[in-house]
Each structure stands twice: as C-alpha cells, then as structure tokens.
Image (cartoon, rainbow, N blue to C red):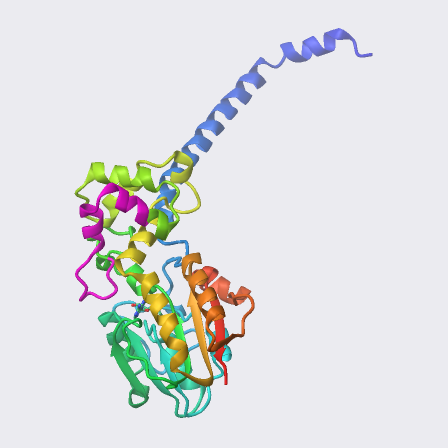
Amino acid sequence: MLPRYRSSEKTSSNPQNCNLLSFVIGHLSLVIGYLSFVIWYCLPYLHSPLTIPHSPVPIPHSLLNMNLDSQTPQDAEEPMFSHIPVLSREIIEGLAVRPGGHYLDATLGGGGHSRLILKTAENVQLTAIDQDADALAAAQKYLNEYQDRVNFVRSNFAAYDFTQSNFDGIIADLGVSSYHLDTPERGFSFRHAASLDMRMDQRQSLTAADVINDWDEAELADIFFKYGEERLSRRIARRIIERRPLHNTVELADAIASCVPAKYRYGRIHPATRVFQALRIFVNDELKSLETFLDKAPNALVPGGRIAIISFHSLEDRLVKHSLRNSPLLRVLTKKPITAQEDELNQNPRSRSAKLRIAERRE
Ligand SMILES: C[S@@+](CC[C@H](N)C(=O)[O-])C[C@H]1O[C@@H](n2cnc3c(N)ncnc32)[C@H](O)[C@@H]1O
C-alpha cells in the first residue's frame, strides 16, 4: 500500500498545474463557444433554397457541358443556363432514341437533354417546349447547329396541342432550372433579396407577392401544408400576416425563420425551404399542369414509343407513378424509379433527389 502522504503530497504540490489546467479549459470552452456561434449563425446562409428537390448549390460553369459535346461554348456574358442534364445517361438509354424519330422535350430549359437526343441518332426531329422565354432564348442559341431539326414552342406543356400518335418519345424534366434559382430577379431563391415573383411564365399575372401579401391566413397555411408538406404551416402563415407587407424574398425567409423553433432554424435545410417550394408550385400551378400533361401525353406516342419523366419531390413523383401505372395505353418499364449513380451524385448535387420513371406505349 502506498503511504498516505504521497497522495496528499501530490495534491498539495499541484496548485499551479490546476490553475494552468483551468486556464486552458476555460479558454478552450470560449473558443469552442465562439466557433459554434459562428457556425450556427452562418448555417442558414450556407443552405440554398429548395434543397428538397432542387438543391441549387451553385454549379461551376465548367460542369455545364458534361455529357454534351462542346462545339457551342456558352458565352460567359449570357445568363447562366448552367443546367446540367440530370440522369442524362439513363434517360437517353431509356428513351431508345432511333434515327429519324420524332421526339418531344416538354421541358426544354437550357437544352441539355434536347441536345443529347439530337446527337444520339441521325436525323432526329425534336419539338421542344418551355413556358419561359429566357429558357427558349438560351436553348435556341445552344442548339443552334440543330436548328433545322428543332421546333421551339413557348407554351405550358399542359396547354400544348398534342397530336395523336405523333412522337417516338417524350421527356419531361420537371420543375425549375438552376438558372431560375440562380437568377435573383426571378424571385425563386432567398439567397438574394429580390421581388417575390416565382413565375416561370412571365406572361402570367399572379406572382408570389400577390399570394403572400393578399391571401388570408388560412389559405396561406393550406398552400404551405399542401405543396410544401410544411408541418408549421399555421404558425408561419400567422407570422407572415403580422409582418405584411413583405417586399422581397429575404424578408419572407426572415419572417419564416423568426417563428420556428431553434432546432428547425438551424436544421439540415433552411426553414423557408418548404414554404418557397410550396409557393413556387402554387404560383405556377405545377401539379395541375403535370396532371393534365400526364393525361394527354400517352396518346401522342406511337405504339412502342416511350415517355420518360424526371421528378424532384414526392408530390410530383406520386403523380407520375400513379398516372403511368393507371394509363391503359402504357406499360411501365421502371418498377422502381431510377436514381442517380455515384459519379453523378458527386458531380451534380441536384441529382440527389431526381427520380426517373419510364413507360412504353402498348402496341
Ligand atoms: C429542370 S428544367 C429542364 C432542364 C433541361 N432538361 C435541360 O437539360 O437543360 C425545367 C424547365 O421546364 C420548364 N417548365 C416547367 N414546368 C413547365 C410547364 N408546365 N410547361 C412548360 N415548361 C415548363 C421550366 O421553365 C424550366 O425551364
């Protein structure tokens, strides 16, 4: 057994060490506290809006031409139509593009998927629809070398006049493009203060500002719950009413962040993400348009023709899944949705939530 004095000797000889230790621990806690505060404070700004399906992490322009031939380099002065075609391998393979075929791209965007269709087989004809004038202008330039084979149409795909048995394949890559999210004045994102617009088709009169500033509390709560699956919809709607009029995207995001619990405020996604998604879907009547499109499109396929649809959130995917499955004209080719593979996930964060479903018109 050790003599007792040894332990007392040990303690009595250590006051300096103890002081030093407390000094170090004290300062360490201060530094950790400071760092945590900085991280907490910055977190909301690190998140981009709409992380649910359309994770708009700014995409390096160098990735733009991935999977595309780069004969038409993008002009750096142009608005950034940096949409990387999501699931491009899978959609082109699934479509089984054939020479001389006629295809429909119902969501032209920057023209990424269209270009792949055009270069996959000889003499392919393409009808390309978008309701956004900026998208059409950018894609027309991007697809310049194929212009004699492309028919550009500015329209909502739901309003498009489908002709029976006209297309060998139809694709739709739903929702907004990175261009929309990255262009502040379009009002889709709360990364920059911009007017609450959110219209994909700028000819439309209803904007997000109209909804946020004029609609009543119960209606707002309904929109947030139905289209954003937002659990705190009522509380958020109440706060918006208290703070109205809201002049821009950042004021709206701040109002939302101010009324949610702290754990929500500093969670995985910014607390305004779901509300922004809901508003966007509502303003553009996205689900109704999708429903109409899914109803009309199968009839426009030739027998054996294929329809391939990429969706980015569960509300869309549910509609696509049921509509393809329930159509008497179609045979579903994807029992489970196709999702992005590792290499694409690493290159394009937006592909994380993409789901591709494909069906074929029965003979
Ligand atoms: C995700 S982007 C498509 C990107 C495109 N696949 C590419 O590779 O560049 C979706 C595009 O579809 C358009 N869009 C969305 N809903 C639409 C609708 N109902 N009718 C017509 N265009 C629509 C949007 O304006 C946007 O430009």
Q: Nearer the viewer, residue 206 or 98?
A: 206
The residue depicted at 50 percent of the width and 62 percent of the height is 346
Residue extending furthest toward the front: 328
Horizontal placement of 224 versus 351: left or right? Answer: left
The quarter of the displayed image where residue 106 is located:
bottom left
- Numbered marks: total: 0
In this orientation, does residue 37 appear? yes
Question: Taking the image as four quarters, which one is ligand 1 found in?
Answer: bottom left
The residue depicted at 23 percent of the width and 53 percent of the height is 208
Q: Is residue 218 above or below residue 68?
A: above
Q: Is residue 263 above or below residue 3?
A: below
Quarter of the picture holding the N terminus: top right
Q: Is residue 84 above or below residue 12?
A: below
Q: Nearer the viewer, residue 87 or 75?
A: 87
The residue depicted at 33 percent of the width and 74 percent of the height is 108
The image position of residue 189, as x and y in percent, is 29, 54
The image position of residue 185, as x and y in percent, is 21, 58
Give the magenta part as a residue range: 198-223
Give yes or no for residue 207 being in the magenta stretch: yes
Q: Nearer the viewer, residue 156 or 56?
A: 156
The image position of residue 237, as x and y in percent, is 28, 41
In this orientation, does residue 78 appear? no
Q: Nearer the viewer, residue 238 or 52?
A: 238
Give yes or no for residue 253 being in the magenta stretch: no
The image position of residue 173, as x and y in percent, is 39, 69
The residue depicted at 35 percent of the width and 71 percent of the height is 293
